[in-house]
Image (cartoon, helix red, strand yellow):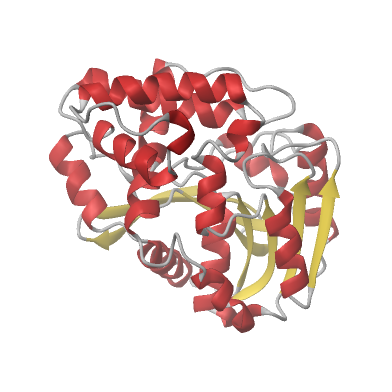
Amino acid sequence: MLYPPTEPYHHAFLDRGEGGRIYFEECGNVHGEPIVMLHGGPGAGCSAMSRRFFDLKKYRVILWDQRGGARSSPSTTTREQRQSMLKHLSFSGMIEDMEALRAHLKIEQWSIFGGSWGTTLALGYAQAHPLRVKKMLLRGVFTATPSEINWLYSPHGAAQIFPKEWDTFLEHLQALREACHLGAGPEKAALKWQDILQVFDLALRHEERQTQERAALAWGGWEQSIMSLQGVPGTSVADHKRNHDMGMISCHLFLNDPVLNSNKLWEGMPAIESLDCTIVQGQFDVVTPTQTAWRLRQTLKNCQLQLVRQAGHASSDPELAGALVKVLDAWVF
């Protein structure tokens, strides 16, 4: 279903100033059709599996870890370094990191494959640089509107489908409130997503390692529990850095960035309304429900939506992975 594992033929860092270094790698055919993969999270980073969606005889695949996550933040080990990284972290900055990478690689025009948060970045980049994008493939569409963020981090969305996991998450939340000396907080039913993210924002940057680690485990545990129809193994201390990066960056961006927690991406859709776009969406995606993908299908004139019945959000769900590979194999340039 997926292509065999492979190794990149080139990898390096791109210096972006202000202490920012972007890790990127290339694999496949150096003379092939260029396509860039945008990982989720935010903050998750690319993995060896990310390379396996592509026919490497056909594509020149560019993978990169977005600013602040995975290998693009090798030095953010202290509280002061994290504060400095967050100071220069923004959605528009990520878009310009991506454009700088394209220019660095001397690619005139490329296609985009984005998943989850990667669809947010894909849409933002395409709106800012429409002439640089040939095609888009999106999985698990997320546009960072208030209603979408609320669905993930309040009692009124995914929590209604996974109540046991949500209660576990709230137990951690209360312990983190106490560790951060924040008091009891609102009743469970009255919690708003801002209340929750503000606690995690403090806990993930707390001076005590134990508090940081509990926050990272709680954040990763909730997200993993709702990810896949196949069931995803629970998170562990070994996943600390990834969970920490994802939680810290998500809280920072969703609470503070002027483009996110708004409808600004939707306001920019006329700039890309004719772009060739394919959406592959798990019918039972609880992280990014299908209604957003359906709305995007109705908004963009040249957009196709494929619903995969036996799939959730995770690209590792076999039916979803197979559908994504088929789209990439079928593309003609």
Residue sitting nearer the eye, 109 or 123:
123
Q: Residue 200 at what x, y percent from top left?
A: 33, 35
Number of numbered labels in the structure image? 0
Does residue 212 show up?
no
Is 320 placed left or right of 47 in the picture?
Answer: right
Say whether residue 81 is left or right of residue 299.
left
The one of 70 and 3 positioned closer to us in this rendering: 70
**Where is residue 310 drawn, in percent x and y?**
84, 35
| Viewer-nearest residue: 75 or 218 | 218
**In the rendering, at what x and y percent does residue 188 appear?**
45, 29
Which quadrant of the figure has residue 242?
A: top left
Residue at 43% in and 38% down: 191
Relative placement, left or right, of 91 versus 181 is right
- Residue at x 44%, y 38% (from the top left corner): 190
State the residue at coordinates (23%, 35%).
205
Which residue is rendered at x = 67% and y = 49% of the image?
Answer: 140
Q: Residue 43: x, y in percent?
A: 42, 44
Image quadrant containing the C terminus: bottom right
Q: Residue 330, can we see it?
A: yes
Task: Pick the quarter of the image with the N terminus.
Answer: top right
Q: Is residue 272 above or below residue 179?
A: below
Q: Is residue 160 above or below residue 72?
A: above
